[in-house]
Amino acid sequence: MFYTYIHLNKDNKPIYVGKGTGKRAYSKRDYKEQYTVKIVEDNVTEEQALDLEELLIAQIGIDNLYNKRPKGGFSKALKADYTNLKKQVASLSVVNKKRLAKVVIDDAINGNVDAIREVFNRLGKSWQRRINNLLELNTQELNVMTHNGVTKWQKEQKHKKKY
């Protein structure tokens, strides 16, 4: 089980937010100021501890903390192997399958083409058709807008100036 903790300075203001197990919260940090430890939530899953850590960092503000990132990470880095994803998924526990799903979605959001393809291929046929239709409509609109190097907006602006 995990916990979420805060390091507080002598004025009782948060200076660091983290998640851990065992004595992690009490391991010495070099903040160049004294601090105390407050366990905010105990006996939770790693995912719950990370969610609370992220929420606290957002509420306090990353600029007010020694934290380097607005979100902690899982204790063991999990990366998607897009060349062998089916085998990777088959070898994982249920908890790690959920973690991997989040990794794939994050990768897709960040523009990883393999991740986007993986998410798209797992959608039902009706969602795939909807997305393809949207892409086709937007592509046609984009082609119309950039025809002959003059955007539709520019043409409209020129037309408006005449009258």
Image: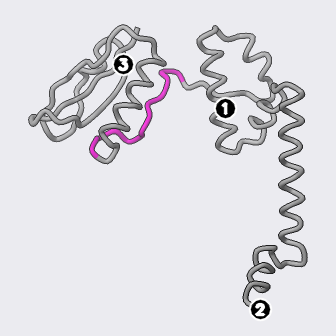
Q: Amino acid at mark 1?
A: Ile
Give the Cα separation between the discs numbered 3 and 1: 25 Å
Residue 52: give x, y in percent of width and height: 39, 24
Residues packed near mark 2 inside 10 Å, few (<14), some (14 to 19) or many (20 plus): few
Nearer the observer, disc 2 or disc 1? 2
Q: Amino acid at mark 2?
A: Lys
* Mark identifier at residue 142: none
Residue 62: give x, y in percent of width and height: 34, 43
Taking the image as shown, residue 137 lies to the left or right of residue 33, namely right
Decide: is 144 above or below 6. below
* Mark identifier at residue 20: 3
Per the image, the residue denoted by label 1 is 105
* Mark identifier at residue 162: 2
Instruction: Give the secondary structure at mark 1.
Output: helix
Quadrant for the C terminus in the image: bottom right
Nearer the observer, disc 3 or disc 2? 2
Which region shows up in magenta?
64-76
Q: Residue furthest front?
A: 163
Q: Residue at x 78, y 16 (%)?
A: 87
Q: Does the magenta run of residues contain 71? A: yes
Q: Amino acid at mark 3?
A: Gly
Give the Cα separation between the discs numbered 2 and 1: 49 Å
Residues packed near mark 3 inside 10 Å, few (<14), some (14 to 19) or many (20 plus): some
Q: Residue at x 28, y 41 (%)?
A: 65
Give the Cα separation between the discs numbered 3 and 2: 67 Å
Taking the image as shown, residue 84 lies to the left or right of residue 111, namely right
Taking the image as shown, residue 86 lies to the left or right of residue 73, namely right
Q: Residue at x 81, y 25 (%)?
A: 122
